[in-house]
């Protein structure tokens, strides 16, 4: 490569810093790709002190100027957010025939169809390996390596903050607030942590993986989302009594020509592979008809891992490879129906607080059996202080809409104190 490849970087936070350090290392190694030049780095504050082994950075506060600069061939967007400056920068850069690399899952989940179309039209790359599961090379694996196998299911742990919180709570190492603040200090929580704990971040990621795995358009609004903020410490204890741990799973699968996309807390067996993915680690499991099961595990955030994914996207551009951003042409994507969560069936964990006296259990059982719900296991935890007891059930597999009707009836029983809590069980993992 003799021509200089001009790079413009927007954002110098955790990912930008990690990427820049690796880029410096790469240049020092003087590989065949050493003709890369950082032309501009757009930042919010030029005066801010930065921990970088580079003395003079070509800083600018004019972010959108990257899209207009003729000496820039590749724009690396590391600002974040689905709207505003990140969206404008990426769109304008693609329109001006620049390759784009982004770590922005929100942007891709909300506007990926539109942006991919512009990239396709202008024959430039739109690479986003760092947007999903940080250092795990899952975009390239699904988009390129596994592309010709028939994928049946793709699922995993796609949010390190939630996995960290759930792991610590499971071990009784702190309550929700303390553990979240710990995750924020460690730098893997989002700027707005509700995106992590309410499942939105994981939903952005599974929506993108679903598009790649099943060749459907990106459809974030079709993803069912439920976070971890309503899980009680008691649920961990009961999960363990039944041989489970609680994980926030992101799942997409295709059954009878319908695609499901969902993020919610799940009971998974203590002995399963996914249960052993702990703390801030991420994991993605791909099931297909040729290989069977592939499990990828690694860090989902942080300067090093995410910077490495940005670097791998850059190397793809250096090699001259331009892929369809979404695996196939956006116009060739299949029109498909997305499955609603109410139509899916699971075994469930249900926790009900009811009066501890004769006949209550019979009424609860009646409401369940009216909807064809069969109980697999049951335990009752009486309270020493009140006349209420906690009834914990594991059901056999039942359609979600039926469970909700039954729980609504149970809620209306005068002997029942509050709405029942339920968590889906992923028994097949
Ligand atoms: N906030 C994300 C997480 C990291 O906790 O996994 C970047 O996607």
Image (cartoon, rainbow, N blue to C red):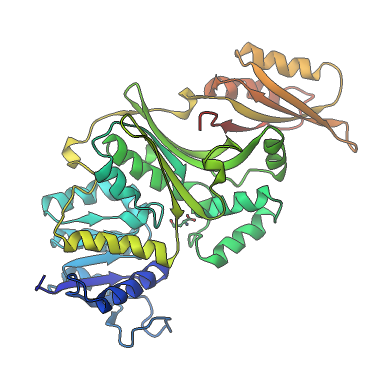
Instruction: Name which quarter of the figure residue 251 lies in.
Output: top left
Tell me, yes or no, if residue 370 can be seen here.
Answer: yes
Residue 415 spot, x, y in % from top left: 79, 24
- Residue in the picture at 52% in, 41% down: 274
Task: Please say if 414 is above or below 2.
Answer: above
Residue sitting nearer the eye, 3 or 26: 26
Residue at the bottom extreme, as displayed: 55
Q: Is residue 82 visible?
A: no
Whole-percent x and y of residue 123?
11, 54
Quarter of the image that includes the N terminus: bottom left
Query: Is residue 8 shown left or right of residue 373?
Result: left
Query: Extreme right residue here?
Result: 385
Vertical placement of residue 89 versus 362, above or below? below
- The answer to whether 102 appears left or right of 125 in the picture is right
The percent coordinates of residue 128 (x first, y second) are: 30, 55
Comparing 89 with 345, the one in front is: 345
Q: Give the residue displayed 33% in from the left and 84% down from the top.
A: 54
């Amino acid at each position: 490569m003799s021509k200089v490849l001009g790079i413009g970087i927007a954002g110098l936070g955790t990912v930008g810093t990690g990427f820049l350090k690796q880029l410096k290392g790469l240049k020092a190694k003087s590989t065949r790709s050493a003709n890369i030049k950082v032309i501009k780095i757009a930042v919010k504050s030029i005066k801010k002190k930065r921990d970088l082994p580079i003395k003079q950075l070509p800083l600018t506060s004019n972010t959108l100027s990257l899209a207009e600069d003729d000496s820039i061939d590749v724009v690396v967007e590391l600002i974040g957010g689905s709207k505003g400056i990140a969206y404008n920068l990426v769109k304008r850069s693609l329109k001006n025939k620049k390759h784009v690399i982004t770590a922005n899952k929100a942007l891709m989940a909300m506007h990926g169809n539109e942006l991919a179309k512009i990239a396709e039209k202008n024959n430039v790359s739109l690479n986003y390996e760092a947007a999903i599961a940080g250092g795990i090379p899952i975009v390239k694996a699904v988009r390129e390596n596994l592309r010709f196998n028939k994928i049946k299911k793709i699922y995993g742990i796609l949010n390190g903050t939630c996995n960290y919180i759930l792991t610590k709570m499971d071990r009784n190492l702190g309550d929700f607030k303390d553990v979240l603040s710990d995750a924020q200090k460690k730098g893997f929580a989002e700027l707005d942590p509700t995106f992590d704990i309410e499942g939105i971040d994981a939903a952005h990621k599974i929506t993108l993986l679903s598009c790649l795995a099943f060749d459907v358009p990106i459809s974030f609004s079709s993803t069912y989302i439920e976070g971890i903020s309503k899980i009680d410490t008691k649920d961990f204890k009961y999960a363990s009594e039944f041989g489970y741990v609680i994980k926030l799973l992101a799942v997409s699968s295709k059954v009878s020509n319908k695609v499901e996309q969902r993020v919610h807390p799940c009971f998974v067996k203590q002995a399963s592979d996914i249960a052993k993915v702990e703390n801030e680690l991420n994991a993605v499991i791909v099931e297909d008809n040729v290989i069977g099961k592939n499990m990828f595990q690694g860090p989902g955030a942080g300067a090093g891992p995410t910077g490495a994914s940005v670097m791998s996207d850059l190397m793809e551009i250096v090699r001259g490879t331009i892929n369809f951003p979404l695996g196939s042409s956006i116009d060739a994507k299949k029109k498909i129906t997305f499955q609603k969560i109410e139509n899916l069936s699971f075994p469930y964990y249900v926790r009900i607080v009811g009066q501890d006296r004769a006949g209550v259990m019979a009424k609860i059982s009646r409401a369940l059996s009216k909807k064809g719900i069969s109980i697999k296991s049951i335990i009752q935890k009486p309270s020493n202080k009140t006349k209420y007891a906690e009834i914990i059930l594991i059901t056999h597999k039942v359609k979600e809409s039926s469970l909700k009707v039954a729980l609504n009836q149970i809620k209306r029983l005068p002997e029942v104190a509050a709405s029942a809590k339920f968590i889906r069980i992923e028994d097949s993992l």
